[in-house]
Amino acid sequence: MVIKKYYLWFIGIILLFILILTYKFFNPIQYDIFPKCPFYAITGYKCPGCGSQRAIHYLLNFDLQNAWRQNFLLIIAIPYIITGLIFEYQKSPTPKVLKWRKILFGYKAIVIVFIIVIGFWIVRNL
């Protein structure tokens, strides 16, 4: 069982590495291999995720200005997501860490993040 677990982690890391290289060297604007947003295709309005693939490409190439223009919500969310992953995979969190986890990822935080995403969605389509 332990070997299988490490085998799956190894495959996951390899796939992640391939994905990162793909986004680094191929701009989603220029290649059709990248998925297009179905919401935008149907409605003509940008969803909160529109521009994320291009933003990732620009981030991996250290072009922060273009990444910010494509989807600044993604840029702001990256530290929040990393923090959540750290909290999730911590073996034995201290009471202080548990307190911060509740503040940053509790019910109120979920509502606030939801409002921010909906607000971003509305404002970017005005």
Image (cartoon, helix red, strand yellow):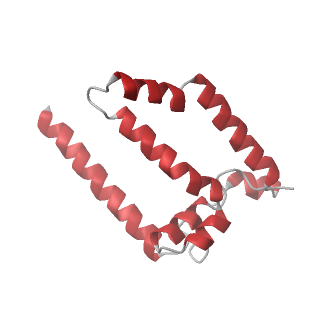
Q: Residue at x 38, y 34 (%)?
A: 87
In percent of width and height, residue 124 lies at 78, 56
Q: Residue at x 64, y 37 (%)?
A: 113
In percent of width and height, residue 80 lies at 51, 44
Quadrant into which the C terminus falls = bottom right
Query: In the displayed image of the protein, which residue is found farthest to the right?
Result: 126
Q: Is residue 65 left or right of residue 115?
A: left
Q: Residue at x 38, y 33 (%)?
A: 88
| Picture mark count | 0
| In front of the other: 45 or 65 | 65
Quadrant into which the N terminus falls = top left
- Dividing the picture into quadrants, the one containing residue 24 is bottom left
- Dividing the picture into quadrants, the one containing residue 53 is bottom right
Q: Residue at x 59, y 23 (%)?
A: 107
Q: Is residue 59 left or right of residue 54?
A: left
- Dividing the picture into quadrants, the one containing residue 118 is top right
Instruction: Name above or below for residue 29 compared with residue 81.
Output: below
In percent of width and height, residue 47 lies at 72, 51
Instruction: Name above or below for residue 67 compared with residue 83.
Output: below
In percent of width and height, residue 101 lies at 45, 29
